[in-house]
């Protein structure tokens, strides 16, 4: 599996595993629940966009 990932994807997967806990995987029964790591990344992106708008004003 890892041979198919580029460096950015490998880093993101390592960060996801570290964030979720030592090798924890998303529960197979809860596929519709958002991955907490993805939620964190989206919140960080929103925060960056807000700061960019404040800086431009």
Image (spheres, rainbow, N blue to C red):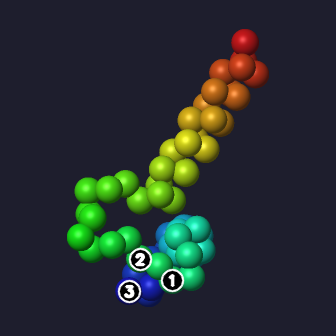
Q: Quadrant of the C terminus?
A: top right
The picture places residue 27, in percent across and down from the top left corner, at 33, 72
The picture places residue 1, in percent across and down from the top left corner, at 38, 86
Instruction: Place residue 50 in its image quadrant.
Output: top right
Residue 40 in view in this figure:
yes
From the image, state whether disc 2 or disc 3 is nearer to you: 2
Residue beneath the point at 61% across and 31% down: 49
Q: Looking at the image, do the residues carrying marks 3 and 1 touch, with CB atoms under 8 Å apart? A: no
- Crowd around label 3: few <14 · some 14–19 · many ≥20 (10 Å): few
- Crowd around label 2: few <14 · some 14–19 · many ≥20 (10 Å): few
> Label 1's element?
loop
Please identify the residue farthest to the right as the structure is shown: 55
The picture places residue 26, in percent across and down from the top left corner, at 38, 71
Residue beneath the point at 37% across and 54% down: 34
Front-lying residue, 48 or 6? 48
Please identify the residue farthest to the top as the structure is shown: 57
Front-lying residue, 32 or 12? 32
Q: Where is 37 relative to 14, above or below?
A: above
Residue beneath the point at 65% across and 36% down: 48
Q: Looking at the image, do the residues carrying marks 2 and 1 touch, with CB atoms under 8 Å apart? A: yes
Nearer-N-terminus badge (3/1): 3
Residue carrying label 1: 23
Badge number at residue 25? 2
Instruction: Place residue 55 in its image quadrant.
Output: top right
The picture places residue 4, in percent across and down from the top left corner, at 40, 81
Q: Cα distance, mark 2 to mark 1?
A: 6 Å
Residue beneath the point at 51% across and 59% down: 37
Badge number at residue 1? 3
Q: Where is 43 relative to 11, above or below?
A: above
Front-lying residue, 42 or 1? 42
- Crowd around label 1: few <14 · some 14–19 · many ≥20 (10 Å): few
Tally the marks. 3
């Amino acid at each position: 599996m890892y041979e198919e990932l580029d460096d950015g994807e490998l880093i993101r997967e390592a960060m996801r595993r570290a964030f979720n806990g030592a090798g924890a995987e998303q529960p197979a029964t809860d596929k519709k629940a958002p991955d907490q790591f993805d939620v964190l990344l989206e919140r960080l992106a929103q925060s960056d966009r807000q700061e960019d708008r404040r800086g431009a004003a």
